[in-house]
């Protein structure tokens, strides 16, 4: 249920989401009649950072799904 559409839209967390997005982009370029469904949540995703001592820290990734709806 995840698909990578844009880097700033947190609807994926790994490789399968990227693969799904990579599948959809050529389909739309070819104007094929396809539909993709994903979950859109305002919470749960974070930006991972590694500090100078090698520790992971997380910063919440805030976004508004309605800004991307057409």
Image (cartoon, grey):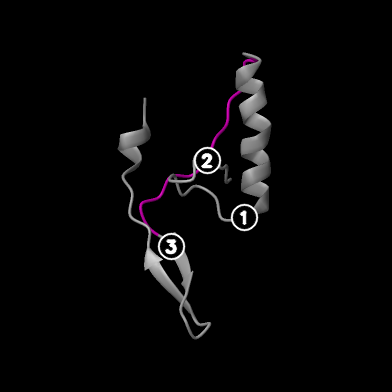
Q: Which residue is drawn at 33% across and 55% down?
A: 62
> Which residue is depicted at the point 43% across and 62% down?
46
Closer to the camera: disc 2 or disc 3?
A: 3
Q: In this view, does 51 lie above or below 5?
A: below
The residue tagged with tag 1: helix, strand or loop? loop
The image shows residue 9 at horizontal and vertical percentages of 44, 44
Binning the other alpha carbons within 10 Å of mark 2 as few (below 14), some (14 to 19) or many (20 upward) gives few
Instruction: Please name the residue shown 43% across and 46% down the image.
Output: 8
- The residue indicated by pointer 2 is 38
Tag 3 near tag 1, CB within 8 Å: no
Mark 3–mark 1 Cα distance, whole angstroms, equals 13 Å
Element under label 2?
loop
Which mark is on residue 14? 1
Number of labels in the image equals 3
Q: Does the magenta stretch include residue 69?
A: no
Q: Earlier in the sequence, mark 3 or mark 1?
A: 1
**Which residue has dot 3 on it?**
46
Horizontal relation, residue 7 to residue 23: left or right? left
In the visual, does 2 lie left or right of 66? right
Image quadrant holding the C terminus, namely top left
Write down the region rendered in magenta. Answer: 32-43
Label 2 to label 1: alpha-carbon separation: 14 Å
Residue 35 x, y percent position in the rendering: 58, 25
Q: Is the magenta stretch mostly helix, strand or loop?
A: loop
Task: Say whether disc 2 or disc 1 marks the residue closer to the N-terminus.
Answer: 1
Q: Percent position (x, y) of residue 52?
A: 47, 81
Q: Left or right: 49 with respect to 61?
A: right
| Residue ID at (57%, 46%) | 2
């Amino acid at each position: 249920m995840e698909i990578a559409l844009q880097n700033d839209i947190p609807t994926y967390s790994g490789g399968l989401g990227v693969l799904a997005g990579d599948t959809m982009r050529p389909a739309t370029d070819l104007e094929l009649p396809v539909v993709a469904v994903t979950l859109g949540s305002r919470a749960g995703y974070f930006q991972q950072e590694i500090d100078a001592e090698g520790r992971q820290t997380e910063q919440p990734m805030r976004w508004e799904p309605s800004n991307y709806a057409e």
